[in-house]
Amino acid sequence: MMDIVAALRQLLGENGVLDQAALSTRSAGAMRPDHLQGAALARPASTDEVAAVLRWCHQHAIGVVPVGGLTGLVHGADGSAEVVLLSLERMNAIESIDPRQRCATVQAGVVLQTLQESLEAHDLIFPLDLGARGSATLGGNAATNAGGNRVIRYGMMRNMVLGLEAVLADGTVVSSLNTLIKNNAAYDLKQLFIGSEGTLGVITRLNLRLWEAPTSRNMALLGLNDFASVTALLKRMDRDLGGTLSAFEVMWQDFYRLVTTAPAQGRAPIAHDYPYYVLLESQGADPEGDSARFAAALESAMADDLVADGALSQSEADCERFWSLRDDVAQVFQGGYPIIFDISLPIGEMEAYIAGLRQRLAEQVAGHRLLVFGHLGDGNLHLAVQVPVAEGEQWRHTVESLVYAPLEAFRGSVSAEHGIGLEKRPWLAISRNEEELALMRTLKNALDPGNILNPGKVLS
Ligand code: ZN
């Protein structure tokens, strides 16, 4: 049998490759009990080295699974004893920050939080933000088109990438590096790789768009009596806050109780009685004026009975405390085995969808608990269906079909932001039609005819 480790060490040096024994000490990712699986883990230090690894694997028909910060939730970076894992952890340089062009050029292995912190001195932000910021890499964020907490204001990762460099399956380096906001010179090739989950190429460097840092922040945690008020409040706040609305998160009552009751650390800023809780955030550039506008908008919503109760932030510490409730997703791992979802559907259909799901779960899944929360302003709900720990995975298929099947009628999506990976591959056809799937296969065959890039992920 071919010695893959030795061959890769010829290309990358001793330090550039971890063997199987070394991999057995590396976790497969957050919330995962298992360790990384691969014939080897390649750690190239430059784009040329990435190209050399891919060229070699292409010649020898060996699969390559790109791994980023391992914070994904859909088994998109799972390997096996037959494949080479490819980590860009040594390509972690912020190459430049240009405050005038408002663009950063980074290597794909830079951790999201590292870039966020580096921009503080420039009064600029890279607005992608998510709970996994301390581990997730910018290359992984691009490969999975990450979403997160401020999509309502800035869009998803796709919207923040100006240009990128990628290596194709055969080792060809395609530079689509670009720092222009407007560039309509034919096909926008970078979009092929963004959200492709490592199946069409390996992203090695990125030009990222930066924004001016806001100087004010106001938040409120609100209790609402019905779902019609939730959707009306979203429209009202978007209008009355004059473009400063930066998050509109919703927690259904069960989730709010979970994250504000022991063993959770958080405590409830307002009573537990409301069916819906909205976490509202506004970011602007006029601290006094923004606070006054925020308070006036909320007073008007309360006068019109859209909001039943609320707590307003008085400080940055309050803002952090409000966010920590919404971000305490670890609690869904308490008291049951959670099966986790990130669906999208039209906001007007959410109430009926959740009511139907509740009923089907009650009929078919004994001992479950449904927790609902998410980026409602973006049409994206997170669901966690807890089932008894001892039965765990036995329930997965039943629960997945109860969650996914009704989305087709609503023209919803099986993945708003987590991607497809292995976990959602069987359900992709609910959200993509035959012609779309055929075109995806045509693209995959054109770019990776040997099917070595993240084989088996996304498309079967
Ligand atoms: Zn999310």
Image: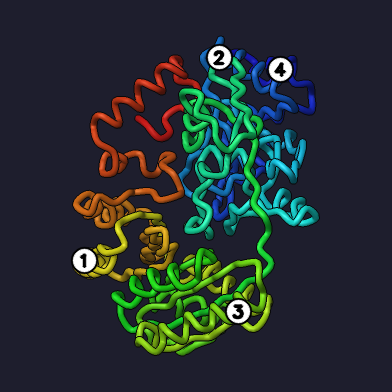
Task: Name which residue type carries label 4.
Answer: Ala
Question: How would you rate the neighbour count of disc 4 (Cα within 10 Å): few for under 14, some for 14-19, many for 20 or more?
Answer: some
Residue at 30% x, 80% y is 226
Q: Identify the residue position indicated by label 4 in the image.
A: 6
Question: Residue 200: horizontal and vertical position, in percent?
Answer: 48, 26
- Answer whether residue 365 is visible to the viewer in this image: no
Question: How would you rate the neighbour count of disc 2 (Cα within 10 Å): few for under 14, some for 14-19, many for 20 or more?
Answer: many
Q: Please tell me in which quadrant of the rendered image residue 380 appears.
A: bottom left
Q: Earlier in the sequence, mark 2 or mark 1?
A: 2
Q: CA distance from mark 1 to mark 4?
A: 56 Å
> Between 305 and 376, which is closer to the camera in this rendering?
305
Q: CA distance from mark 2 to mark 1?
A: 48 Å
Mark 3 against mark 1, which lies toward the viewer? 3
Q: Are marks 3 and 2 in contact (CB under 8 Å)?
A: no
The relative height of residue 291 versus residue 170 in the rendered view (above or below) is below
Under circle 1, the secondary element is helix
Under circle 4, the secondary element is helix
Residue at 53% x, 34% y is 79
Task: Name which residue type carries label 2.
Answer: Asp
Coloring basis for residues: rainbow
Question: Residue 292: horizontal and vertical position, in percent?
Answer: 58, 81
Mark 3 against mark 2, which lies toward the viewer? 3
Question: Residue 458: horizontal and vertical position, in percent?
Answer: 40, 35
The relative height of residue 243 versus residue 61 in the rendered view (above or below) is below
The numbered mark at residue 170 is 2
Q: CA distance from mark 3 to mark 2?
A: 55 Å
